[in-house]
């Protein structure tokens, strides 16, 4: 089959690789119908050292099932708490002999605990929308849900990328009254307004803090959702949060000053299980 391999920073190739095959009774082979590139794929694209053992790329894909950010057994104590990304028996896509999601097919370990049935066929017009449930929409929803966003809240979303826009959708779904989107890309912030943002703040640093506080009567936001930003975005979050408020940050950060390495971030990633069940009412296992 054909799959996407990363050999080094800026060196991505689509090559022939071995077809996936069942290796354990709990495996499934999924014919991939749709896949996409995640923002976290861009970090190794900029920084990965050259290797003779290229990584199989991709962790957002679907067939007539949806696969989440990681694979997991869905039976351990962590999975029972909605923390499938911390499953001691699970792992990441594209490493340790597991296929990536940017290819024609993928072997899925622990398939019964990982894959979720979709209520549509492979020719459905809904598939591009459902693809967001493999990672990005769940991550934005997780940011809002774990922050405790509720009806009447004031929420600031830091970041206008796909996760930030998903967080806007989630904040609106959970009943936030004021949603401030901090972003500087007009095409994205226009989408954010369509999705429910009541205000857009393009300023950063002290100017951005002042602007958010003006919009919130001088207090700041009760809930701040920092969506896959660098260190400056986290600092911005502390600047705009109200006293006694909550900051919820998601994504795999790429800075060392704060101990948020990828392993730490992985422990904080969302459970696709309850996101799917709450947003779509889907609960069927594979």
Image (cartoon, rainbow, N blue to C red):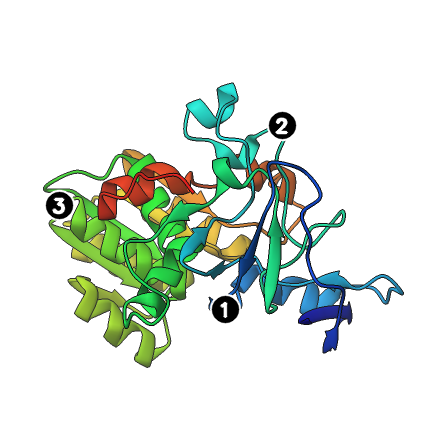
As displayed, is residue 226 above or below residue 102? above
Q: Is residue 61 something that shows in the picture? A: yes
Residue found at the far top of this picture: 77
Residue designated by label 3: 175
Quadrant of the drawing holding the N terminus: bottom right
Mark 2, secondary structure of its residue: loop
Q: Nearer the viewer, residue 282 or 51?
A: 282
| Numbered disc in front, either 3 or 2 | 2
Residue 268 seen in the figure? no
> What residue does disc 2 label?
88
Residue shown at 27% from the left, 44% from the top? 282
Image coordinates for residue 281, horizontal then vertical, percent = 22, 43
Q: CA distance from mark 3 to mark 2?
A: 35 Å
Taking the spot 74% from the left edge, 69% from the top edge, the residue there is: 6
Q: Is residue 255 above or below residue 48?
A: above
Among numbered discs 3 and 2, the one appearing first in the sequence = 2
Q: Residue at point 47% right, 31% down?
A: 83
SS of the residue under disc 1: loop
Rendering coords of residue 209 (x, y %) = 33, 56
Sequence-wise, which precedes: disc 2 or disc 1? 1
Pointer 2 local density, CA inside 10 Å: few below 14, some 14–19, many at least 20: few
Where, by quadrant of the figure, is residue 245 drawn?
top left
Residue at 35% over, 55% down: 137
Residue that numbered label 1 is attached to: 36
Location of residue 215 (image quadrant): bottom left
- In the image, is residue 57 above or below residue 245? below
For label 1, the crowd category at 10 Å Cα-Cα, with few meaning under 14, some 14 to 19 and many 20 or more, is: some
Marks 1 and 3, Cα distance to the nearest angstrom?
30 Å
Q: Is residue 89 left or right of residue 126?
A: right
- Foreground: 282 or 184? 282
């Amino acid at each position: 089959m054909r799959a996407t391999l990363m050999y080094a920073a800026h060196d991505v190739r689509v090559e022939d690789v071995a077809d996936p095959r069942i290796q354990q009774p709990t495996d499934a082979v999924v014919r991939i119908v749709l896949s996409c590139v995640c923002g976290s794929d861009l970090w190794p694209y900029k920084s990965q050292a050259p290797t003779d053992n290229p990584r199989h790329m991709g962790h957002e894909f679907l067939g007539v099932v949806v696969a989440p950010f990681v694979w997991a057994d869905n039976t351990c104590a962590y999975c029972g708490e909605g923390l499938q990304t911390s499953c001691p028996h699970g792992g990441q896509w594209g490493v340790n002999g597991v296929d990536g999601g940017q290819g024609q097919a993928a072997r899925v370990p622990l398939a019964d605990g990982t894959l979720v049935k979709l209520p549509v066929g492979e020719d459905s017009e809904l598939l591009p929308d459902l693809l967001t449930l493999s990672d990005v929409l769940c991550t934005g929803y997780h940011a809002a849900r774990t922050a405790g966003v509720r009806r009447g809240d004031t929420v600031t979303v830091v970041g206008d990328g796909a996760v930030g826009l998903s967080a806007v959708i989630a904040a609106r779904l959970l009943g936030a009254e004021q949603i401030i989107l901090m972003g500087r890309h007009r095409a994205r912030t226009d989408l954010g307004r369509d999705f429910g943002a009541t205000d857009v703040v393009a300023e950063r640093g002290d100017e951005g803090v002042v602007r958010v506080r003006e919009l919130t009567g001088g207090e700041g936001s009760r809930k701040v959702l920092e969506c896959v930003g660098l260190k400056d975005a986290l600092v911005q979050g502390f600047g705009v949060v109200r006293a006694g408020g909550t900051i919820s940050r998601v994504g795999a950060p790429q800075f060392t000053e704060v101990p948020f390495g990828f392993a730490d971030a992985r422990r904080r990633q969302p459970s696709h299980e309850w996101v799917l069940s709450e947003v779509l009412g889907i609960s069927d296992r594979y």
